[in-house]
């Protein structure tokens, strides 16, 4: 699914390409499932930090079967079941991916689940474990707790032994967050969730706040963060990038912690591979499980991203080539 002009998801069009070329250090993959993410919308609008030359295909999460391996690749073989995390280009029936961005799939996971879990679970795991050092017994507040990364954060936080609070905007989303490990859920449209968080923690506040929303949600989060708490800056789905008065940071000794997940491929890929191993163990133990809310044919990527952009979806949307 190719973007020839930056016009949002509606600009996606079907194109049939020649056979992919697998270069040195790369792995060719017959794609069975593709995960959709909010930044797929942004990249088609030219509003994401990654801005490929036109034309390009969006898509970062794929799962499928290895068809070919390039020179120098020894860790993969033909017919291996794998997932891959790309910069872009995943909205396709076949891809060529750098070997260091490809991961063996556990035998018990389906292609749909693998495509739905790669980026969101790695983002949340690296954020909570590597960046925030979330510990058992701490209180974790997850915003947009029924979304892709939010639901992953709820499951991982629960698996790590934290007390998890989730916020969402509908009854169904609150129920989904609760079913996936949230101990308490608040409707941010109807409740004063800041007061409720402070009440639940006896005035202490949340030790870690996972914020993929930004805007007003971030502003309010600074009012219920604990002493020496950590606010994870995951994204800005609200559309507004917030700022903060630094005296507020000083008064509570809390930390603002960025999580630019993709940067680890360039700076420290070992972090991502260790995260993937930990996630595979959690999956095998039944502690985490991707929630796929809808699937669409790859050719209906426009419709899939429109559903995602409406914020009426829960969990993950997956495309099937």
Image (cartoon, grey):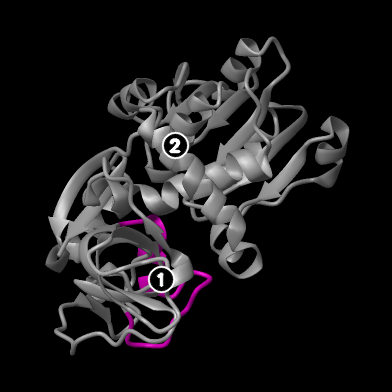
Quote the CA–CA distance across marks 2 and 1.
32 Å
* Quadrant hosting residue 134: top right
Q: Nearer the viewer, residue 150 or 191?
A: 150
Residue at image coords 22%, 46%:
110
Q: Position of residue 218 (x, y in %)?
A: 61, 41
Range of magenta residues: 36-56
Residue at x-position 44% and y-position 30%: 155
The answer to whether 222 is drawn above or below residue 102 in the figure is above
Q: Earlier in the sequence, mark 2 or mark 1?
A: 1
Q: Which of the 4 image quadrants contains residue 148? A: top left
Magenta segment includes 55: yes
Q: How would you classify the magenta stretch by its main secondary structure? A: loop
Residue 11 or residue 279, whichever sits in front = 279
Q: Residue 123 at x, y = what percent? A: 51, 49
Q: From the image, tell me which residue sits under label 1.
A: 43
Residue at the image point whose x is 42% and y is 66% from the top: 75
User: Closer to the camera, 283 or 139?
Assistant: 283
Q: Which mark is residue 281?
A: 2
What is the quadrant of the C terminus in the image? Answer: bottom left
Mark 2 residue element: helix
Q: Is residue 275 left or right of residue 227?
A: left
Q: Is residue 216 left or right of residue 290?
A: right
Task: Please identify, in this view, whether the residue under mark 2 or under mark 1 is nearer the observer.
Answer: 2
């Amino acid at each position: 699914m190719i973007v020839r002009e930056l016009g949002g998801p509606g600009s996606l069009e079907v194109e049939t390409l020649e056979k992919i070329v697998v270069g040195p250090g790369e792995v060719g993959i017959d794609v069975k499932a593709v995960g959709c993410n909010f930044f797929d919308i942004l990249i088609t609008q030219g509003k994401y930090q990654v801005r490929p030359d036109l034309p390009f295909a969006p898509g970062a999460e794929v799962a499928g079967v290895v068809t070919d391996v390039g020179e120098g690749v020894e860790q993969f073989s033909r017919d291996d079941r794998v997932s891959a995390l790309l910069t872009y280009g995943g909205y396709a029936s076949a891809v060529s991916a750098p070997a260091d961005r490809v991961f063996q799939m556990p035998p018990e996971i389906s292609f749909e689940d693998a495509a739905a879990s790669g980026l969101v679970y790695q983002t949340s795991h690296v954020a909570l474990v590597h960046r925030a050092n979330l510990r058992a017994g701490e209180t974790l507040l997850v915003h947009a707790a029924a979304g892709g990364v939010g639901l992953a954060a709820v499951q991982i936080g629960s698996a790590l032994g934290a007390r998890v609070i989730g916020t969402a905007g509908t009854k169904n989303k609150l129920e989904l967050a609760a079913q996936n490990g949230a101990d308490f859920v608040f409707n941010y449209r109807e409740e004063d969730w800041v007061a409720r968080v402070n009440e639940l923690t006896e005035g202490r506040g949340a030790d870690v706040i996972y914020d993929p929303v930004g805007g007003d949600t971030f502003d309010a989060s600074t009012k219920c963060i604990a002493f020496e708490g950590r606010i994870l800056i995951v994204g800005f789905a609200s559309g507004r990038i917030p700022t903060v008065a630094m005296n507020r940071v000083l008064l509570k000794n809390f930390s603002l912690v960025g999580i630019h997940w993709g940067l680890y491929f360039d700076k420290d890929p070992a972090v991502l591979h260790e995260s993937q191993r930990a996630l595979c163990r959690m999956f095998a133990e039944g502690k985490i499980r991707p929630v796929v809310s809808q699937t669409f044919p790859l050719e209906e990527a426009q419709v899939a991203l429109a559903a995602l952009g409406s914020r009426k979806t829960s969990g993950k949307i997956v495309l099937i080539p």
